[in-house]
Image: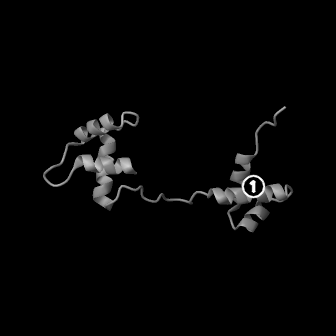
Amino acid sequence: MTQRIQILVFIGCGNKTRAQQEVCNLFNAKYPDNPITQSTVSKIESKFRETGDVKDLPKSGHPKITQDKKIDIVLSMEENPQSTATLVASENELDERLVRGVNKEQTPLFLPV
């Protein structure tokens, strides 16, 4: 986030603005471990002009499950290994598919020998 703001500072305002390629060069000189392209500068500048902010807009679709909810699901499955995804989902007020996804993430494909 602070690097996006730094890009806006490099761009400047009013009559004292820099070209996007010049901003790109300045940024890359200051942050050589995190180089950007002129396209990145363009996107950040456009986003700021449209929204007045450099934060990413909320994504469409179902929100990601929080780490706390994942822990709740795993604990529910460990406490009662015979419970179904439907039951765990109901207990945690979640969608059954989310529970299955977390279960799949937590289940190793191969058991260590």
Residue 62: image quadrant is bottom right
Query: Could you tell me which residue is drawn at 85 percent across and 58 percent down?
Result: 80
Question: Residue at the front extreme?
Answer: 30
The residue at the point 34 percent across, 59 percent down is 53
Residue 10 spot, x, y in % from top left: 25, 46
Q: Is residue 102 above or below residue 24?
A: below
The residue at the far top in this view is 113
Residue topped by disc 1:
74
Secondary structure category for the residue under label 1? helix
Vertical relation: 46 (above or below) 34: below
**In the foreground, 15 or 60:** 15
For the C terminus, which image quadrant? top right
Which percent across, then down, holds residue 68? 66, 59
Q: Name above or below for residue 34 compared with residue 7.
A: above
19 sits to left or right of 56: left
Residue beneath the point at 75% across and 55% down: 74
Q: Nearer the viewer, residue 15 or 62?
A: 15
Q: Position of residue 27 (x, y in %)?
A: 30, 39
Disc 1 marks a residue whose amino acid type is Val
In the displayed structure, does residue 75 sit left or right of residue 70? right
Q: Position of residue 49 (x, y in %)?
A: 27, 57
Place residue 100 in its image quadrant.
Answer: bottom right
Left or right: where does residue 61 sit relative to residue 24? right
